[in-house]
Image (cartoon, rainbow, N blue to C red):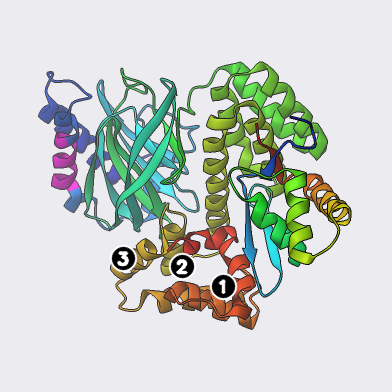
Amino acid sequence: MTQQESKLRLHRGVIWQKTAGTGLLYDRYRGTYLKLNSVGLLLVHALAEPTGQSVQDLAQLVSARYGIPLDQAQGDVGGFLHELRGNDVLEPLS
Amino acid sequence: MTTHPLVDRFQVLGQAMADALGTTGSDASPRFSRIAAEQLECFLPKLRGFSLEDILSAALTTKAEQLDVESHFGDPPITWFMGERFCIESYVWNDNSTNVHDHAFAGAWTTLVGQSLHRQYRFEADEKITPDFELGRLFLQNGERLVPGMVRQITPSDQFIHDLYHLDRPSITLIIRTCRLDHPLRGQRHYIGHEQHALALKTFDRPPMEILQRRLLKASLQDSEATFLHLFQALLEQEDFEVITRLAAKTGFLLSHKQLGDCLRLLENRWPLQGHYVSEALLHQRQLATMINLRHRRTDTQDRLLLGLLRCPSTREDLLEQVRTLAETEDPAAWIFQRFEQWAEEGELLQLTPTQREALRGILEGQPARNDEILDRFTLQNEPLLQVLGTP
C-alpha cells in the first residue's frame, strides 16, 4: 500500500457535532474546538468511520457530492487534512 | 495542662474496644469491623454535642501516639487512642474530600460533626497489569447522606470501595481501625474513572525515586510547557506502564487541559490499548477537580450536595434520581437548574447566554433540542462540570 493510499481516521478522543449546515469538532483530550464548514463536516463524518478513509476516498467523496473535478477536490481535501493534522486530531489506521 | 474531658472519653472507648476484642481473631476479619461498629454505637450518646473547637482544644491535651500526623487524610488527622491492635482517630474535613478508595485496614466510622455524601462502588477488572494496578470499570452501587449517629463498617480490600464528599464545613469523622498500614493481601488502592474506563492503582508508599520523578515533573511546570513534556517523554522511555500512569495521575490535575491532552497522546502512543483506559480515567479525574475547586467557594450544604453528585460516575437519569432522594425534592431538574442559574449569576460557572440557559434546562428535562440550540447543547455537554448531563 502506498503512503497516499494509507488510511486515516479521527482520533478516538475527538467528537463532532452537526449543526445547521455547519459543525464543530471537539478534542476531549485537550479541550479545543474547530469549526467546520459543510465540506469539513462531510469529511469529518467520513473520517469518523472506524475503518478510516484514504485521501483518495475523501477526494472522490467531495468530487461526487459537489460536482467538482477530482484534482480540485484533492487539493481541498489536502488542505483540510493539513489543518486536522496540525491540530493532532487524526490517527493513522494500522 | 489539664486533660480535656473528651480525651478521657476516647480512652474509655479505647479500653472498651480492647476488652470486647479480646486477644483472639484476625484483625482483617469481619469480626473486628463488627465489634468496632458496636462500640461506636454504644458510645455515640457520650460523643454528641461537641464542636470543632472542642475537638481541637481536646487534641492539644492528648498524649496518644499519633499514627500519621503528616497524612492528608483529614485536616488534620488526630489519634486519640493507640492500642496494640487498633487506634481511634478523628479527621477534620473542611474543603478536602476523599478519593474513591479501598482499605488496607478494618474498622468502623461515624460522623461526629456535620454531614457527608457517602457512596459505594464496585470495580470490575478487565486486565491486571500488576498486583497493584488493574484496568477495569467502576460502578456506583449506592449513595447516602451520613449524619451524626450513623455508623458504617470498613472491610479490607476491594470488597468495600467508597468515597466521602463532605457537605458541611467542617465535618468531623471518628474511626476505630486496625493499626496495620498494610493488609497482607495488598496495599490500599485508589480508583479513578467511570463505568467504561477505570483504574485501580496503589498510590501510597512509593519508592523515593518515584517520588523524586513526580516532584521533578511538578518543578518542570514552573519552567515551561515544553520542559514538562520533554521530561514526561524521557520518563516514558525509561519507566513501565504502572509508574507512568501513577505519575500522570499525580500530576495531571496540575496541568492545563491542553497539557494533559498532550501527555495522554504520548502515553497512548506508547501503550495504545491500555493507554486509552488511562486517558479516559484521567479526563474524568480532571472533571472531578473542577467540582473540588468550585466547592472551595460554595459553602452552602445543598450546593455542595449537587457538586458531590456531579462528580460521581453517573448519567443524567441517575443524577436526577439521586437528587430526588438525597435533596428530598419532587422536581430534581428544577432544583439543579436553580443552582446552576445562581452559580452563573455569581460568576462561578459558565457565562450562560440565554440560548445556552434554555439548552441547559432542556438537557436537564431530557427534551430534544431545537435546531438553534444544538451548538449550545454541545458546548454545555462538553464543559467538565456538565459532562454528566450529556449521558441520558
Residue lying at 74% horizontally and 64% vertically, measured from the top left: A65
Which quadrant of the figure has residue B186? top left
The quadrant in which the C terminus of chain B is found is bottom left
Task: Give the residue type at disc 1.
Answer: Trp
Looking at numbered disc 3 in the image, what kind of residue is underneath it? Leu
| Pointers 1 and 2 within a single chain | yes
Q: Earlier in the sequence, mark 2 or mark 3?
A: 2
Measured along the vertical axis of the image, is residue B131 above or below residue A27? Answer: above
Secondary structure beneath dot 1 equals helix
The stretch in magenta equals: B34-43
Q: Disc 1 or 3, which lies upstream in sequence? A: 3
Q: Mark 3 points at which residue?
A: B326
> Decide: marks 1, 2 in contact (CB < 8 A)?
yes
State the CA–CA distance, disc 1 to disc 2: 9 Å
Kindly identify which numbered label has been placed on residue B192: none
Kindly report which numbered mark, 2 or 3, lies closer to the viewer in this rendering: 3
Few, some or many residues within 10 Å of mark 1 (<14, 14–19, 20+): some
